[in-house]
Amino acid sequence: MYYQRLIEKEIELKLRTSGAIVVAGPRFCGKTTTCMLYQKSYIKLNTQQAIAMARMNPKAVLKGEAPRLIDEWQKAPDVWNQVKDDLDFDYQFGKYILTGSSTPADKTEVHHSGAGRITPVKMRPMSLWESKESKGTVSLSGLFDGGKDFPWDTNADFTFDDVAFLICRGGWPISVQAPKDIAIEITKNYYNGLFVFEDCENERFRNKKPEVLKMIMRSYARHISTEAAISTIMADVRQSNERTMDAKTFDEYMEALKDLYIIEDLPAWNPNIRSKTSIRSTPTRHFIDTSIACRALGISPEDLKKDLESFGLFFEDFAVRDLSVYANSIGGTVTHYRDNAGLECDAVLHLENGRWGAIEIKLGGDKLIEEGAKSLKMLRDKIIGKSDEKAPDFLMVLTAVGGAYQRDDGVYVAPINLLKP
């Protein structure tokens, strides 16, 4: 069964406006399945023979009716150069689709950026709207249009049990489609297979010790949704595992995690406020999918419910995943805000035309919602008249559970299982 993905519209647009697209993202997020909808011929570089043949004659890989899908292109990096050269000679829109779950083993083999020829498209795991687990009655696009149809919904049938399960299961299509009683076990299997590099053709990954990658991920997970400095994470790895590690080695392992699309930090927003306020530029630490962080620490749904502080941080990461998917589908981006006065905002959604909305992410409950609304209004007041930014189009507290409504002060409150782009 195929679940429609929000990224389909972007793929269709890029194929109409670019000679080639490269769809990149973590393993098992659905790249190949979705891109197969658009190909008229394809080749999968998923066997040693296919990889060896592609490396010996990369130009032959391009032969086939367009759009030509080349799956896991990075296993024969010169394919990139051949695609670029072919488009230089005979440019046509929608000629090639490349997919990959990591960057090339040797980046020096990619001689051209592909700018103007090959357009990148990033694919993430499934959001709740895509997995049909969000009712979709709260639209981010609708909020930018004034929130006229914002619902009043008690949402009583969605509980902390549901949220904890969804966080631990993740948005992997193979887990989403599985029966609930085995879905998390399937995610465990996915996680355990992330670092099996013995037969990997990528020497950079073969040289990485899985236990060290897992140590770093555990530390990253302990600092999830925070602005922890890299030096703090490195010190945590050393202390927790009694292991010496120099900065160069740590950086190499961090690069591998990024190349595998496992970690995805949220950049800071700098609105250039004309005051003595200093805006912090440290990103918040996030995963491409929160289930990876859960597996790194061996966390179950029951564990989350026993520790509400940790639950809140993991839920923030979970919400950032969905917000990132939704923002991308409406041509937007997500950042976070924090200044030296202690004012912060978990997610700021920006559109290309300069419009923006601010979102505080909370588990729920009157006290946390009130705290979130207060921070949002303080941010709005600090921005208006003290920077070149426009006033926000909306302020919203995004919750794990509870109802959807608009407060008397204009701040919206919405649970994550009602959200859509």
Image: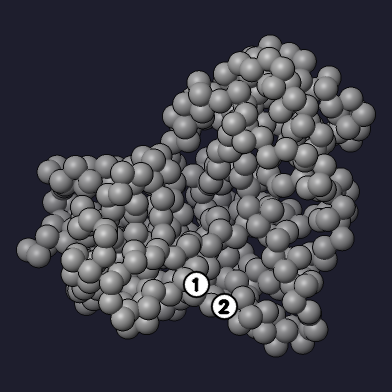
Give the percent coordinates (x, y) of residue 300.
54, 67
Residue 61: which quarter of the image? top right
Q: Number of numbered discs present? A: 2
Residue 64: which quarter of the image? top right
Does residue 228 appear to the left or right of 32 in the view shown? left
User: Which sits in the foreground, 161 or 275?
Assistant: 275
Q: Quadrant of the C terminus?
A: top left
Give the percent coordinates (x, y) of residue 403.
20, 58
Give the percent coordinates (x, y) of residue 5.
47, 35
Does residue 149 appear to the left or right of 420 in the view shown? left
Does residue 57 appear to the left or right of 395 in the view shown? right
User: Which sits in the foreground, 92 or 414?
Assistant: 92
Q: Residue at point 61% right, 82% down? A: 232
In the picture, the disc for residue 229 is 2
Q: Residue furthest left?
A: 408
Question: Can residue 277 be seen here?
Answer: yes
Q: Residue at point 31% right, 81% down? A: 276
Does residue 253 appear to the left or right of 318 in the view shown? right
Report, in whole angstroms, how far the alpha carbon at label 1 lies from the one at label 2. Answer: 8 Å
Asked if marks 1 and 2 touch (Cβ < 8 Å), the reply is yes
In the picture, the disc for residue 336 is none
User: How packed is label 2: few (under 14 Cα within 10 Å), some, or many (20 or more)?
Assistant: some
Q: What amino acid is labelled 2 in the image? A: Ala
Check the image and report above or below for 74 versus 187.
Answer: above
Q: Residue at point 82% right, 42% down? A: 109
Q: Could you tell me which secondary element the residue under label 1 belongs to?
A: loop
